[in-house]
Amino acid sequence: MQTLTKGYRGLSLLMDLNWDLVLYVCTIAVALAAGAFLGTFYI
């Protein structure tokens, strides 16, 4: 149980430090998905 708690705290710290990178990657993924969705209408 302690290992799980320490792992969760470590993951939380990693997310706190890199939240902007995660946001950037998610934005790129959403933009690519939207482009693919809209691209299917113009083929």
Image (tube, rainbow, N blue to C red):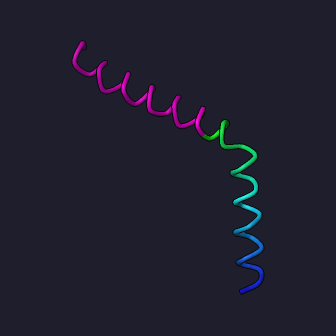
Q: Residue at x 58, y 37 (%)?
A: 23
Residue at the top extreme of this rendering: 42
- Apparent side of residue 25 relative to residue 43 in the rendered image (left or right): right
Residue 22 drawn above or below residue 2: above
Front one among 43 and 26: 26
Quadrant holding the N terminus: bottom right
Where residue 8 appears, as percent x and y from the top left, is 70, 69
Residue at the bottom extreme of this rendering: 1
Front one among 16 and 22: 16
Residue 41 drawn above or below residue 19: above
Q: Residue at x 77, y 80 (%)?
A: 3
Predominant secondary structure, magenta span: helix
Where residue 14 appears, as percent x and y from the top left, is 75, 53
Residue 17 drawn above or below residue 28: below
Q: Residue at x 53, y 37 (%)?
A: 26
Residue at the front extreme of this rendering: 16
| Residue 26 inside the magenta-drawn segment | yes
The segment highlighted magenta reads: 23-43
Q: Quadrant of residue 33?
A: top left
- Apparent side of residue 8 relative to residue 40 in the rendered image (left or right): right
- Apparent side of residue 23 relative to residue 42 in the rendered image (left or right): right
Quadrant holding the C terminus: top left
Where residue 41 appears, as percent x and y from the top left, is 22, 18
- Apparent side of residue 4 relative to residue 23 in the rendered image (left or right): right
